Image (spheres, rainbow, N blue to C red):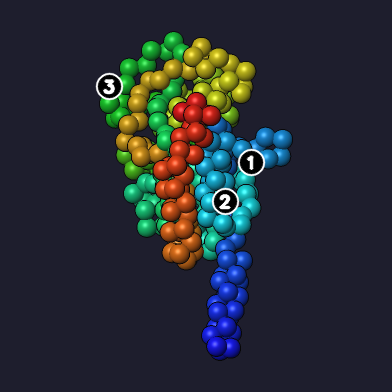
Amino acid sequence: MKTLVKIVLLLCVLITVSCAKEHMIVLTEEFPPYNFTLDGEVVGLSTEVITAILSEAGISYEFQVHPWKESYDTALSTKNCMLFSTSRLESREDLFKWVGTISPADYSVFALAGKDIDLPTLENLKDYKIGITQGDAREAYFQSKGFVVGKQLIVAENNAANLKKLINKEIDLWPMPDAVANYTAQDAGYKSEEIIEIAFALKDLTKDGYYLAVNKSTPDSIVMKLQAALDKLKADGTYDKILKKWGI
């Protein structure tokens, strides 16, 4: 009997130690309204979903906000790091373990309102200068379609910089998630419908929405726990409440 008690106590200790090791570094970028900092706190639609997932899974964490490429490279190379909001592209499929979808995403190519740019096909975009951010899904997507950085693709530091380039006519087109483009325009002091308009719909980019990308060396048990937590949030209505709060 004493031996059985010792075994049970040992198992409890091992489980406690194992859970204590489940601490995740959660990396992201300034990408409102999905994820961004406000008064020193990381907020946004995707942020709320991730916070709910981690709480449900009982995993401790800390958020870190960096430029996209820095966050991406860290998540790619560091165990127990994960990255959101991440497009699950074919070129990234084997680089991470995936949890999702965490949020919907509709992409369009925007032009200045009133420009009336005619874009019947994606190939027609090659006649224009397109503003992108280094290392993000849009850069990878357009490069996979034969667009060239420095020719059609003009790199800027962030989305706000690209909007400024569009307004100053340094670029002609701005591929963005619809919600982010509208938020960026409004944050810059414009009515989005008066400054930008959809010139082309990117229906095959992130058509399933955004994911949580988890470093491949992270144990499968943690990834499965995260996915199970997300599934529960979707089943009990918590996920839909978060989307509704953010107008999506």
Q: Residues within 10 Å of mark 3 (few under 14, many from 20)?
A: few
Residue 134, image x and y in percent? Answer: 50, 42
Q: Measuring 38% from the left and 20% from the top, which residue is drawn there?
A: 199
Residue named by callout 2: 55
Per the rendering, the mark at residue 228 is none
Q: Is residue 165 visible?
A: no
> Does the CB distance between marks 3 and 1 fall below 8 Å?
no
Would you say 226 lies left or right of 128 here? Answer: right
Mark 2, secondary structure of its residue: helix
Q: For marks 1 and 2, give the one nearer the viewer.
A: 2
Locate residue 165: give its quadrant. Answer: top right
Mark 3, secondary structure of its residue: loop
Q: For marks 3 and 2, give the one nearer the viewer.
A: 2
Residue named by callout 1: 42
Q: Measuring 49% from the left and 14% from the top, which residue is drawn there?
A: 193
Per the rendering, the mark at residue 120 is 3
> Does the CB distance between marks 3 and 2 fall below 8 Å?
no
Q: Measuring 56% from the left and 57% from the top, which residue is drawn there?
A: 58
Lower sequence index among marks 1 and 2: 1
Residue 149, image x and y in percent? Answer: 44, 39
> Does the CB distance between marks 1 and 2 fall below 8 Å?
no
Looking at numbered disc 1 in the image, what kind of residue is underneath it? Val
Q: Measuring 58% from the left and 30% from the top, which residue is drawn there?
A: 161
Front-lying residue, 107 or 230: 230
Looking at numbered disc 2 in the image, what kind of residue is underneath it? Ser
Lower sequence index among marks 3 and 2: 2
Distance CA(mark 3)–CA(mark 1)? 39 Å
Looking at numbered disc 3 in the image, what kind of residue is underneath it? Pro
Front-lying residue, 228 or 93: 228
Lower sequence index among marks 3 and 1: 1
